[in-house]
Image (spheres, grey):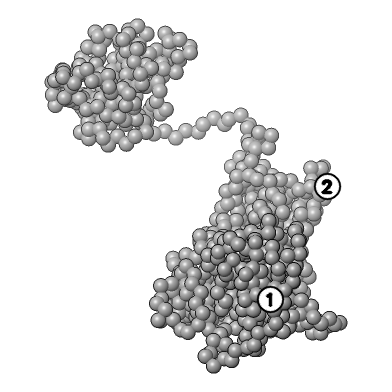
Amino acid sequence: MQRSLRFRLPQAFRTCLSRVPRRVARTVLRGASAGNGRGLPDTGELALHLASMGYAVDAVDWANCAFPSTDAHLDDPAHRSVRWQHLDIERANLSKLQADGYDLIVLRMVFAFLRDRTRLTRTLGRRLRTNGALVVITPLAATTPAERRGIALDEDEVAHLVSMWGQAQRFDANGMAVLVLRGLKKPAAQITNTPSPPLSSVTEVHAVATDAQGRVLLDRSQQGWELPGASAEPGEGFEHTAVRALAEQTGVTAVPTDAHVLGLHLDAPDGFPRTSVVVRISAHTGQVQPLKPDEVEHVDWHPLHALHRLDRLSATSARALDLVWPGVLPYVPSAHMYPVDSTYPPVPGELPEAVERREAMADRVIAGGWAPSLPVQQALRAVPRHRYTPESPLRTAYHSDLAVVTERNDFALATSSVSAAWLQADMTEHLRLTAGMTVFEGGSGGYNAELIAHVVGPAGRVITVDLAPYVVRRTRRLTAEAGSGRVTAVLGSASDGAAEHMPRGGFDASVITYNCWDIAPAWREQLADGRYLVLPLEVHGYTRAIAFHKHGLVLRATDFQFCGFVRDRGPAACTVPTIDLADGELQLRFPDGAPAQTADLDNALAGPRHEVATGVSVASNESFETLQLFLATTLPGFCRLARNRERDSGITALPKGSDAAAITADGSLAYLTHILVQDGPTPEQRRSEFMAHGFGPSGPALAEQLAAAVRRWDAHERAHGYPELQVHPAGTPDAELPTGHVLDKTHSRLVWTWRSDAPDTPALQPEKVSAHE
């Protein structure tokens, strides 16, 4: 059976078909033998006409509204030989069409509307059987009103269509052309040099070179400071352009093998397209001198941390500097950036002051007891911390007690940082590292990973994962500039670990460098048994860096350290439920667990405040960090009460902007503060006593419960430090847990066992309760 394929356009153009005489239609069909053939025509009359001649017809239209017009022909026997299909021939999958091809394909009033006429013509042409014909019926531009030019073809367009076929016949009638086309030609693939367009864009190449002190070379013209650079000459590689510009403008010489393309930026100042290529010079010789005094006024080396103080720096140079050292400038004009994965040896260079400050920092950290092992001490003295914080002055980079913020969000909150050196050293020590280990780090930055890489040595490696593209890009760039080559920065969620980089048996150690509300299953599963995981864990909003030793599925805490880190921004991040009280002056926070019934708390706060003296005091230089966790893990209904910085009605006696440990129950509230009870010239002599405060009907009882817990801590926990802590997988039955206070999180069950949990611990007598109106 012969087959026919017929396409048509929407209703708006159907009236044009009436201008095609039936004699033309008969001419179109001449040469395609009737009877037992297949065609794909337009919906409607022509489809039925082809079917009546013996064709099996696929009638295709892009709009469903085209098909109802055929309902009148339902009783026509020819109708049964027509398949009506709703199909967009340019965009849809044409697999619905007959796989064995067609004898006739008709495009009626379609061709002028096609986006890619050549592609579709060849696609349909390949579906024709031997001696099959493609018929195109189209209005001609010469006889079509100007406002309807888009529906017609001009003579050049017709000629191009005809040129694709071995045989072509044309019939004109009433401003319409009917083209009968056979024998699709094979395309001749040609590669030609197109003529150069008029000058409409420019490519600039910038050379980034640093000296033995790590300073970057800039030259100054009337427009301001900028990197040495030039436009690429015809046939010249970017590396050669950078080397040429460096020599011609500054007198510094390099070879192309020491020039490395790092990426390019695209922008369009004043609508003029510009491509800026960034080339890093890893080695050079020669003395700096301006060789083009008519163009360059001055050439000099500049410390990276001082670049933001330059009076004028070109936008293209600023973007180039930011590509090499992300974050080195506080603001960089935006542009499309395309980094290149370029590999080259670390580029040496640092100020003598940096060496001195690094030694002094290491001395302070070691003297504080944070780095007792020789490998960690050597890492502190060897790894150039300032090169991972290029935007910071040396005194900030090498301050042993300060974290350096490297990224902030729109609310100026820190989202990435390089932690204090003492804390990084302490956490590294508790990983119990040895040479050759493979270590996982969650949360990237560069410096901490390189510290670890130095400890594990040439045979070891560090896999660091972060979900922020900027942080990963910065880590890769800074470790490439100054690293060991043993740190791999991976873009992804750190809570998923890095299974594709995990050695057989698991990672030898894992460290997380952001606040964690929970312990991700991947960290436990991807850690080798008997090895250590160190992470900052949040417990009711209090953060401690805890070292865990893995025993099968159980993690056992071996060390706690008071600390603070940037918050988790990944899929495992926890949103803290809060409740505002007293018209926004106070806020209750529930970092672990659902909020309690607080409907009556505003009424409670309007009543008297009850105070309970605990009789427990601390010196101003004395830590009570274990008290926070003791209250948080042993008291039911625990939460945090925070006071707004801007408002003060005197309700709570809380300092502005502070928060306090609190408990709630029965529409009542109690919280803990401390007041100065003994002054003196030294921190040891100044002492403050803990006071419990209560509001509401159960306020006095809650205040006494809170005060009793403080006394219990003082008597049994204060002198002994942190409790035993075990972490079991979520779903572990209660019967399999050790004795203690259980804090359930999404993936973990934390069991806290304090010394006062022993059954023979004596009870303590309560203090007197007083009330304040």
Residue shown at the point (38%, 28%) measured from the top left: 118
Judging depth in this view, the residue of 228 and 24 nearest the camera is 24
Mark 2 sits on what residue? 297
Is residue 126 at all visible to an observer of this figure?
Answer: yes
Judging depth in this view, the residue of 516 and 33 nearest the camera is 516
Relative height, residue 555 to residue 322 (above, below) = below
Single out the residue that lies furthest toward the bottom: 760
Mark 1 sits on what residue? 692
Give, as a three-letter code, the residue at label 2.
Glu
Is residue 347 at all visible to an observer of this figure?
Answer: no
Give, as a three-letter code, the residue at label 1.
Ala
Residue shown at the point (76%, 80%) measured from the top left: 688
At mark 2, the secondary structure is loop
Picture coordinates of residue 100 (x, y %)? 20, 33
> Does residue 581 appear to the left or right of 650 in the view shown?
left
> Does residue 663 appear to the left or right of 189 in the view shown?
right
Sequence-first tag of 1 and 2: 2
Quadrant of image for the N terminus = top left
Residue shown at the point (64%, 41%) measured from the top left: 267
Single out the residue that lies furthest toward the top: 174
Judging depth in this view, the residue of 287 and 511 nearest the camera is 511
Q: Nearer the viewer, mark 1 or mark 2?
A: 1
Residue shown at the point (86%, 82%) measured from the top left: 681
Relative height, residue 404 to residue 72 (above, below) = below
When asked about the image quadrant of residue 282, the answer is bottom right
Quadrant of image for the C terminus = bottom right
Pointer 1 with pointer 2, Cβ within 8 A: no
Mark 1, Cα crowd under 10 Å, few <14 / some 14-19 / many 20+, is many
Relative height, residue 771 to residue 305 (above, below) = below
> Does residue 502 appear to the left or right of 21 in the view shown?
right
Picture coordinates of residue 558 (x, y %)? 55, 83
Picture coordinates of residue 742 (x, y %)? 49, 77
